[in-house]
Image (spheres, helix red, strand yellow):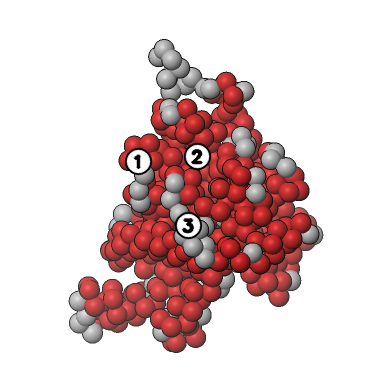
Amino acid sequence: MSGGAGFFDIPSDLQHTYLGLIGEHLKEALIPVAGGLALSLPIAQLCVRFRWLYPPVLWVTTVLYAIPSIAFFVFLIDYTGATETTVMIPLTVYSLVVLVPAIVDGVRSVPQETLAAAEAMGFTSMQRYLRVELPIAVPAIFAGLRVATVSSISLVSVGSLIGNEGALGNLLSDAHVFHRSNLAVTSVVTTAVLAIVIDALLIGIRMLLTPWLPRGSRSARRASVDAVTGPAPEEARPLEEAAR
Amino acid sequence: MSIFHFINAFFSDGSHWHGYDGIPTRIMEHLQYSFMALGIAAGIALPVGLITGHTGRGGNALALIATAARALPSFGLLVLMFFWLGIGLTPVMIPLVALAVPPILVTTYEAVRTVDPSPVDAARGMGMGPAAVLFQVELPVALPLILSGLRSAAIQVVSTAAIAAYVSLGGLGRYVIDGLYQRNYEIVVGGATLIAGLALAMIALFWLVERLVVSPGVRRGR
């Protein structure tokens, strides 16, 4: 391991240990997802309440999703500089784009009878939202969260292109500069493992939150398709209805 | 404001419009990488998705593969492949294909699997074989959803193909990477705008394709 050629000998220009980079990576990836979730819940609720709002919102999100991360980072350098914020703003937007349709579909899939029952029990609309609609939408929301989180973890690395803001991705530029392919292996493997571990954690949390669902439920898988295809206008739903 | 100034300056500079570093050349390169990756990914994912969706088996294995492929960081994979394989198209194709396979695979599987069972039964009752059922009944009905998977893959591939420039290839990423090194934000912003524009063009393209290939009956039913 002399000459600093090991997998875990992090070059000093990164000013982080291996674990420090992992922490940094998680921070840069997960804060945007949390922010995206916080923003998309009210937006989705507005789309459910006012149906006419949903198609234009879908269009805006589709367009935003089409902006490449590298382009998005670059646009922002002018305003927020080469900082973590510049990486986290686009990731927040991408999370939002994945989450809004997932939540809207999830909340809309709540059966009319259930809503009527909640109303008959004297729930206010806020109670109904928090205790009926949201819990039933949990599988759909989590399907969206999983896609958003995994892609966020993967995209943080691109931040290394705008100056050392890519956490584990910075190992890639260092691998390039110092001709140490070991560092690239470390970066790729660690990022992939992080994504898989966080994904598994989310599945676990989803199961804890929805004890009434059989494992690997159909609706969850259905929702995961919606999440993969992203903000796909109208395609999926009527097909699903036809299948019943 | 300043961004629009940069964009304007980039596009009004005549020297950006020809030569090997001109906008038309870079767009063609970008499209070449993108469609090649998309073609390979579709070649892998469509048949697998169609067959597994038709038989309704292997869904969990597919979900597992898709999750694993999605967990691979494209940019990291590119740099790694560059180290292992050197300069060329292959190190660029591997991450792009890995990026495009999961959405195509998962949506195709799910699209075919969730086709209304009654026309499928009717087709079987009329004596259609498995291939005829798949291609004449299930595929046309599943087409809109399959196309949305392809579209989502196309958008991601076009966006991500920009990183090819990082390992010395062409494409629109060239402007972004070179501009960043030269601290020339006019070029960076111009390149970024072109990539975003190309990604949006993909949405338009798929909208057109859907108009053309999806049967009017299926479209009306939705």
Q: Chain of mark 3?
A: B
Residue at 20% in and 76% down = B129
Q: Amino acid at mark 3?
A: Gly
Dot 2 and dot 1 within a common chain: no
Q: Which residue is mark 1?
A: B86
Secondary structure beneath disc 1?
loop
Near mark 2 (Cα within 10 A), the count class, few <14, some 14-19 or many ≥20, is: many
Foreground residue, A208 or A191? A191
Q: Nearer the viewer, mark 2 or mark 3?
A: 3
Percent of width and height locating residue A57: 68, 67
Query: Where residue B171 is drawn, which disc sits there?
Result: 3
How far is disc 2 from disc 1 in space, using C-alphas?
27 Å
User: Considering depth in this image, is A114 or B192 the residue closer to the camera?
Assistant: B192
Evaluate whether residue B96 shows in this view.
yes
The amino acid beneath tag 2 is Ala
The N terminus of chain B lies in which quarter of the figure? bottom right
**Residue A17 in the figure: left or right of residue B47:** right
Residue at 47% x, 82% y is B211
Whether labels 3 and 1 belong to a single chain: the reply is yes
Which amino acid is tagged 1?
Answer: Gly
> Label 2: which residue?
A195
Q: Chain of mark 2?
A: A
Res. B105 visible in picture: no
Tell me the element at label 2.
helix
